[in-house]
Image (cartoon, grey):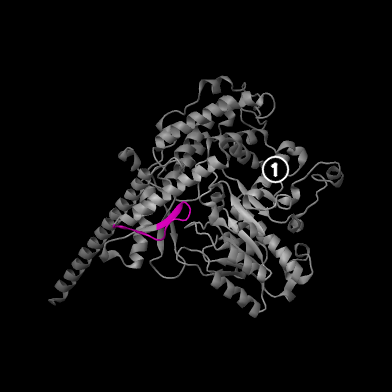
Amino acid sequence: MNTETRTQGTLPIPSQAKAPVVPPQAQAQAPPEGGPAPLSGGADGPRALEPLVATVLAALTEGAKRRDGPVAPGRPEDIAASVAEALASGAGAGASTGVGPGGVTGPGGGAALARLTELLAHGSADPADPACAAHLHCPPLAVAVAADLAVSALNPSQDSWDQAPAATTLETLLLQEMARLVGYDDTRAAGVLTSGGTESNLMGLMLARDRVLGAATGRQIELSGVAASGSAGRPRILASAAAHFSVQRAAALLGLGEDAVLSVPVDHELRMDPDALAAALDGCAGRGELPVAVVATAGTTDTGAVDPLRACAALAAAHGAWLHVDAAYGGGALLSDRLAPLLDGLALADSVSLDWHKLGWQPAAAGIFLVRESETYASLARRAVYLNPVDDEEAGYPSLLGLSLRTTRRADAFKIAVTLRSLGRDGLGRLVDACRELAVAGARGVREHPRLELHSEPVLTAFLFRYLPHAETAAGARSDDINARLRRRLLREGRAVVGRTELPGEGPGRVRLKLTLLNPHATADDVGRLLAAVVAAGKAEEAAVAAVAAVAAVAEGTEEMEGTEETGVMR
């Protein structure tokens, strides 16, 4: 890595560096001036796509070379200015390239595609770089991206059979596979592809609201609304203090209010405390409140912790509550023979969230929502005469409309199906295991370094830690500040993308750094270098803080001396 390049603090757009790379075939295949823009489908679509895809691939290569690391160096305002300049440089180009009201294009289209793709590649955080390890942001498999291109070219929409004949059946069959993977009876389960855990969690809690609150009031909540259910007691959702924030957001969207969510204490590893859950449920009963749902997490965002699923299921059932398991992250453990036992009890859940764009190496979005019993999906059923008329369904034309919150919806099942047929569960499981080994190695490196402190051992592929400043600057607030600042230094210099979070609780000393290791091609040495970069950045921030303090001390001393001279008082 070139140090001078990494620390320059700017993000030049391609036009500032050199002309964008446009393969000759992209120029040669461009439509005539004023001609119709080519389409991606039909028999001629692949021929139109080929030179454009070549342009994209060349620009991706060039952008990655110029970035030369996990993220381009610079501050947010530098990057924003470069993007704005790049867009402005293409504004008004329609007059000269043929882009205009008629929806036509000319030879300039290839140059715009090259320029902006190179800008995007250069200005992206690249999860395929071993030093990009902040989030549940996986480097997608090439085969999955290629499959996604096919979906983009054909553009099927899953809201009616006549827009997606093959994709409708493919999604249905894939969901049956996913149901079996979770441990459900695939002849009784149901589900849908979603945009991710946030949408899946919303769906699970919506069905919980309708099912549990509906049973308590004798009303169809999806029709009468929550306001008509006052006699049942205040609805409550119970989730751990480490649960995803989308639980509160879903409660708000469902008319329950964020305050309906009761936070259940967690242990040191951020797993829900089953005794605390039992006490919270008993408290609901004592106050005349209605526990609508228990949300258990299988793979918390920060530590990968898995709540005690069997205990959660037993307690939810005893109190008549729906059990939703957010396995958006931890669901990937089902692919690994070694890690799958961590999710023991998952099959007891009424609904489950899975995200294949985390530990599944799919391009986003690749979320999956499943329910154990298809009859519990009833409140989402929807009839739109222009999409799923009764006579069509009676004639054998299936519809997925009543399974999703969305209408227009991509065929995201396709890339997952292609990946499974290409690598198989065993192949994907080896990727999961490789990332788990990286996390174990990284945690060991933290334990062995005198300036780093490990929060807890990794459960899946992530772990929390912090940089330990020298004793004289190690008070909680100062430690928090230095850890936060060192992370921004690494970003600003383009050296690493490291996560930052805070432990549950109150007061200073809770800031932690996070490595989320989802790159199966990375090595233990890569993780070691990343930890070394964290330590170096921490020392640099300590030095910067000390320098500022020294300047302040000198300034204060000068003021005191001047004051003494004016008053004539010696100290």
Residue positioned 43% across, 46% down in the render: 132
Q: Is any part of residue 494 visible from this angle? A: no
Q: Is residue 119 left or right of residue 177?
A: left
Tell me: residue 47, above or below residue 471. Answer: above
Q: Quadrant of residue 514?
A: bottom left
- Residue 84 percent across, percent down from the top left: 49, 42
Q: Is residue 519 left or right of residue 571?
A: right
Front residue (pair 184, 207): 184
Bounds of the magenta span?
450-464
Q: Is residue 53 left or right of residue 316?
A: left
Front residue (pair 328, 492): 328
- Residue 54 percent across, percent down from the top left: 53, 27
Work out which residue is located at the far bottom of the displayed protein and give it: 286
Q: Quadrant of residue 295?
A: bottom right
- Residue 5 percent across, percent down from the top left: 34, 38
| Mark 1 nearby-residue class (10 Å; few <14, some 14–19, many ≥20) | some
* Residue under pointer 1: 173
Residue positioned 54% across, 72% down in the render: 276
| 462 inside magenta stretch | yes
Quadrant of the snapshot with the N terminus: top left
- Residue 345 percent across, percent down from the top left: 60, 59
Tell me: residue 285, above or below residue 69. Answer: below
Quadrant of the snapshot with the C terminus: bottom left
Residue type at numbered disc 1: Leu
The rendered magenta stretch, by its main secondary structure, is classed as loop
Badge 1 element: helix
Tell me: residue 57, above or below residue 3. Answer: above
